[in-house]
Amino acid sequence: MRNSKKYNKILFISGILIVILLNLKSLWYITGLFSPYSEQISKEAELKLYYFIQQYIIHLIAFQVIAFYNFSWKNSIAKFFRFSKNTNIIFTIAANLFLFFLFALFLAILSAGFSGFGKMIYYLLGNLFVYILAISVAYLFVFLKQMYVLRTENHQLKTEKANAELISLKEQLSPHFFFNTLNSLSAVIRTAEKSDSLEFVEKLSQVYRYILDSGNNNLVSINKEIAFLNDYSYLLQKRFGNNFIIDNKISINVMDYRIPPLALQVLLENVTKHNKLLSSNPIKISIENTEDFIFFRNEIIKKANVESHGSGLKNLNKRYLMICGKEIEISGKNNEFYVKIPIIK
C-alpha cells in the first residue's frame, strides 16, 4: 500500500514536470508579459495569455487523468466489473480513445466555442503527443512497479527459504545433543551418588531451558553462550571426569556481542568426540578472542575409528553463512586443532 502511494506521488509530480516542459515556450511568453521591462499588456496579448493558461491546465489534467487511468484506475475498473483479459484490453483502448476526444473537445470549446468536428480534430492531432507521452509514462511506471514487486517477492522467498533451512539446521542439533546427554545421564546414574545424579538432572534441565529459549533466536550474546557452555561442560565432566580442562580467556569487552546459539557447545562436543580423554593427560582447551573472532583451540589426541556424520562443524558453518554471510575457519597443525568463528556486533 505504501509503495503504491509512493508511485502515485512520483507519477503525479512527473506529470507536472513533463507538462511544464511541453509548454515551456508558452510559459516563457507568459513570463515575458509580466517582466518589469515589458509595456502594458495589449488586448491581443491578454487573449494569448488566457489561451496559454487554458492550454496548460487542459494538458495537465489530460496527462494526469490518462496516466493514472492506464497506471492503476483501469485495473480497479476491470476488477469491479470482472472483465476478462480480452475485454479489459478492448475497454482500455476504447476508454483511451474516449479521453483523447474528450480533451480535444474541451480545447475546441475553450478556444472559440465548438464550431464543428474539424476544430476538435485539429486539437486532437495538435495535442496527440501529450496523450501518447502520458500513456508511455504510465506503462513505464507499471513496468517499474512490477519489477519492484518481483524483486520484493524474490527477496521474501529467499528469506523464507533461508529461515526454513536455518530452522532445519537447528533441529538437526537437538536429536544429536539429546542422544549424547542421555548417554551422560546413564553414565552418571550408574557410577555417581544420588545427590550427584540429582545435580546432573538439574544442570541438564538448565541446558535444555537454554536450548528452548534460544530456539527462536538466530543469535545470542556471548555472555549467555559462555554460561551455557559452563553448564554443558559440567555434564560432560560428570560423564568423562576431569579429562579435559577449559581455559576461558574471553574478554569482558565482547560479552554483549553475539554468536549463533550452541556454537561453543558444538566446538566442545567436537573435541570430546574426536579425541581420547585420558585422566593421565587431560586435553587442554583454550577459548580466546580478538575484536572480531573467537578462537577455540584444543590439543589433538586423536581417537581411532571415530564414527562421524560430519554434521557439527558443517552445520555451524552453514548457520554462519545464512545468518551473516561469513564462514568459520578450521585448521589443524602441530598437534593443535583450532576453529575460528566470527563475532557478530
Image (cartoon, rainbow, N blue to C red):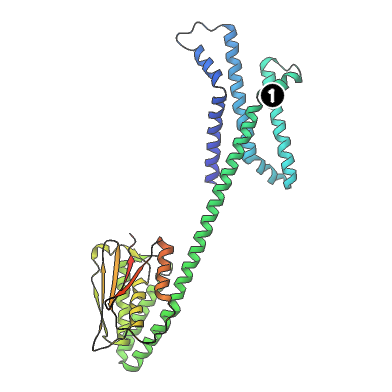
Dividing the picture into quarters, in which one does residue 125 lie?
top right
At which x and y percent is residue 64?
60, 32
Q: Residue at x 33, y 82 (%)?
A: 272
Q: Is residue 309 left or right of residue 265?
A: right
Q: Is residue 126 above or below residue 91?
A: above
Dividing the picture into quarters, in which one does residue 189 lie?
bottom left
Is there any visible trace of residue 82 in the rendered image? no
Q: Which image quadrant: the C terminus?
A: bottom left
Instruction: Work out which residue is located at the far front of the displayed protein and give it.
Output: 334
Which element is circle 1 on? helix
Q: Residue at x 55, y 19 (%)?
A: 25
Q: Is residue 25 above or below residue 235?
A: above
Residue type, label 1: Leu
Q: Is residue 142 above or below residue 342?
A: above
Q: Is residue 56 left or right of residue 219?
A: right
Which residue position holds label 1?
Answer: 125
At which x and y percent is residue 298?
28, 77
